[in-house]
Image (spheres, rainbow, N blue to C red):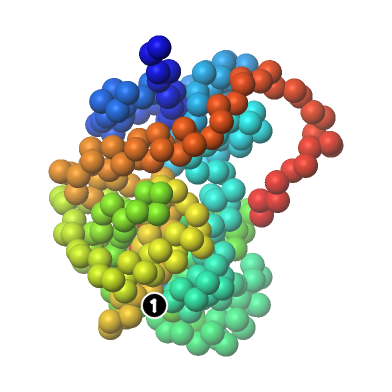
Amino acid sequence: MMKKKLVVGMLNTGKSGLEERLFSRVAKRKGVKLVMINLSKRFNEKEFEKEIAPCDVVYNNAGEEFVLEPLKAIEEYGKQVVDGSKLYYYTEDKWMCYVKCREHGIPTPKTTLLPSNLALAKAELREFGQWPVVLKRIYGMEGKFVEKADNLAEALAILRSIWAKDIDKLPFVAQEYIKSYAYRVTMIGGKIVQAVIKKSRHWKCTGVYSGDCEKFRVDKKLRALLGKVYRATRINICGIYLLKRGKEWLVLEVNTEPGLVFVRAEYEKLIGCIFDFILKTARKRKPKKSKKTVRIPVAQLHLRKIR
Ligand SMILES: Nc1ncnc2c1ncn2[C@@H]1O[C@H](COP(=O)(O)OP(=O)(O)OP(=O)(O)O)[C@@H](O)[C@H]1O
Ligand SMILES: [Mg+2]
């Protein structure tokens, strides 16, 4: 009897670039049926459920915030996902990342949570006393809400200007500044699959560069540290950022949906590793009978605590 192909749904936002082509190509090679779920069109829940129904497992490959809502729905439908939505709200939160690292004995830059009231934030920054200081919104990517201030006046001007535009006044952390390149390790299912150095003339080594990043060797000590990070965060497909203070490694953050394109020659290999991981873990679980979703009144739902 022919073995049933694993059906993987990939949430994306309708781009049909190189990454999507590579995912399709690798899926074919690995014997996986890939269903691209485009979320940049109008959202219709019934249609969406139909699209999701044949999938054995769903992988989120879209960075947009909107995608988290459909992802949460998929989890409520009882489908297996590669990395759950909770990680985005909790483990990726820059304050929680610090707390988690500290609790697990993982070295990380000194960090403090700033009250959303400017006068209180001022008092906190003064007591924190780390100059220059890095100010970061608890959520953010591509360094968009990450700023460096040399003194208290500069720090307050930055917070004032950001909060003036943000009615929710999302919290910020203040973090000690470590002069370092950014070291980026991609881990899939707890295995190190790539380690690169991100260099920049700017103090922020963020984003994806036009050229390849230089690779670096992960020694025994760092390997042990990364193992600890994986066990503490449990993000299956992740990018771990580290800074270096002298010989000491400091974990900066752990990202879901990591960029895969830092070394072009390894782009396809990394996608292959993602499929290998999905194949390995999806088959471990008993296939669920595609159940008809039972609608439970919201009041009866045991809602996940996500914040
Ligand atoms: N405390 C720090 N000391 C020195 N450099 C820092 C510090 N925090 C951040 N940076 C620099 O700024 C970059 C972006 O910071 P961070 O990763 O916190 O922001 P982000 O918005 O999540 O970016 P990304 O999308 O690259 O993950 C880092 O890669 C690093 O180069
Ligand atoms: Mg990040």
Q: Name the side, left or right, on which 283 lies relative to 287.
A: left
Q: Nearer the viewer, residue 34 or 252?
A: 34
- Against 271, is 222 above or below? below
Residue 116, by quadrant, is bottom right
Residue drawn at x 49%, y 30% as measured from the top left: 57
- Residue 137 placement (x, y as % from top left): 52, 61
145 to 219, vertically: above or below: above
Callout 1, which amino acid?
A: Tyr
Quick check: 146 above or below 56?
Answer: below
**Residue 270 in the image, given as x and y percentages of width and height:** 27, 43
Q: Residue 208: x and y, percent?
A: 27, 50
Q: From this viewpoint, which residue is outermost toward the top?
A: 1
For the residue pair 46 and 205, the one nearer the viewer reads as 46
Residue shown at the point (61%, 35%) measured from the top left: 75
Q: Is mark 1 within 8 Å of ligand 1?
A: yes
Relative to 42, 197 lies left or right: left
Q: Secondary structure at mark 1?
A: loop
In depth, the one of 100 and 205 nearer the eye is 100
Count of marks overlaid on the render: 1
Look at the image and tell me in which quarter the N terminus lies.
Answer: top left
Q: Name the residue that disc number 1 marks.
A: 177
Residue furthest front as drawn: 1
Q: Is residue 109 left or right of residue 170?
A: left
Where residue 155 sits: x, y (%)? Answer: 48, 75
Q: Residue at x 84, y 36 (%)?
A: 300
Q: From where the camera sits, is residue 141 visible?
A: no
User: Badge 1: how crowded within 10 Å, few (<14), some, or many (20+)?
Assistant: many
Q: Is residue 26 visible?
A: yes
Q: Specify the quadrant of the image occupied by residue 114.
A: bottom right
Quadrant assignment for the C terminus: bottom right
Q: Residue at image x 50%, y 54%?
A: 234
Image quadrant of residue 197? bottom left
